[in-house]
Amino acid sequence: MAERAPAEPRILLVRLDGLGDTLACIPALEGLRRAYPGAAFGAVLSPANIDVFSQRVEHAFAYEAAHSENADRARVERDIRDAKFTHALVATEEVAGYALARCSGAPRRAGFWHRFEKPLKSLWQYAQLTDRVYRPAAWIARPEHEAQALYRLALAFGAPAPAPADSAAMRAWLPVDASALTHKSALGVQIGVKLTSDGWGPSAIAALCGAALRASDLQVLTLLAAPADQGLAHAVMEHLDGDVRARARRAQSDGLPSWLRDLDTLAALIAPDSGAAHAAGMLGVPVIDLFGKTRFDQLSRQWRPWAAPSACLVKPQAAAGVAENFGAQVGAQLAHLRALDPRARA
């Protein structure tokens, strides 16, 4: 007989991967909160993501096994044990994630295993967990959404089905104003190196931005970029047509919470498949998610934005006139998505 969960469990999320991977855990956290309204939550995250959650996650532990000194790792492991978690959600397939869940002392530990598709790894995974959830080891043609896969871990601990997908609930897990569900007027574009694939330079990206802004009927263009991409954002700004440049600004975020608040000011977002698209989805910001042609069907099924109105499109190869035509297509699609925006109806 399965062990009965306590009335107010202490739940540890272990996710040591990138930003999009971490954001995909939010439905699982929300499902567990609904199952156990008095639960306390903690998370072990990569240092880059340590500020991603709101105060709903009371204990956040930064852990980077590959680059931490032994003493630092021992200190984090001790702090995790001292927090006395009752449940650990191993939302990663990294060996360190399973080990952290085990050393936390949590009596129940849910995570993925591959049955006997990878015999040695599967047996080791099985031994680390009390609640094992099967996930294929190999790439499949029609994968489930990452958030749904992670939600199966929460189901093992009693979360209700189906996985929640309302943006008002998702955004409460992020460090933004949970009540700021107001309609906005700026079109955002996340500038990053992924946008430069298939021959797209600053000029083509600027043409895409301008055409999308005009077709969307929005008034302001906001360029967002990580510190490493600020040079590209500056070059795109320089290539904007004069009428668009007069309505454009570059967001100057000083950390992950600030960047999330910048995203939250937008009426809609255009982004390459990246953390920005997933963050916008959780915030309820309508988003166009741009993918490459390779494995588009699989990747867009697994990594499309979760809660907001969204569309996944293939970014075409750059050529004369392509950026303008594709930008007009994107802008028209954005107008359709914005009509579905619950913030507008609010």
Image (cartoon, rainbow, N blue to C red):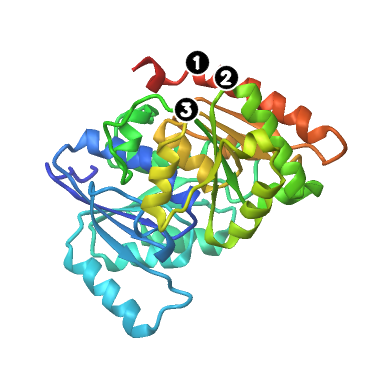
| Contact check, label 2 and label 3, Cβ < 8 Å | no
Between the residue at mark 2 and the residue at mark 1, the CA separation in whole angstroms equals 7 Å
Three-letter amino acid code at disc 3? Ser
Residue positioned 70% across, 24% down in the render: 329
Is any part of residue 15 visible from this angle? Answer: yes
Q: Which mark is residue 185?
A: 3
Q: Which corner quadrant holds the N terminus? A: top left
Three-letter amino acid code at disc 2? Ala
For marks 2 and 3 on the same chain, the one whose residue lies earlier in the sequence:
3
Please give the residue where the numbered disc 1 appears in the rendered image: 339
* Viewer-nearest residue: 316 or 295: 316
Between the residue at mark 1 and the residue at mark 3, the CA separation in whole angstroms equals 13 Å
Find residue 68 and report its horizontal and vertical position in percent.
41, 78
* Viewer-nearest residue: 123 or 12: 12
Please give the residue where the numbered disc 2 appears in the rendered image: 335
Q: Is residue 265 left or right of residue 136?
A: left
Between the residue at mark 2 and the residue at mark 3, the CA separation in whole angstroms equals 12 Å
| Contact check, label 2 and label 1, Cβ < 8 Å | yes
Find residue 212 and report its horizontal and vertical position in percent.
65, 29
* Viewer-nearest residue: 218 or 259: 218
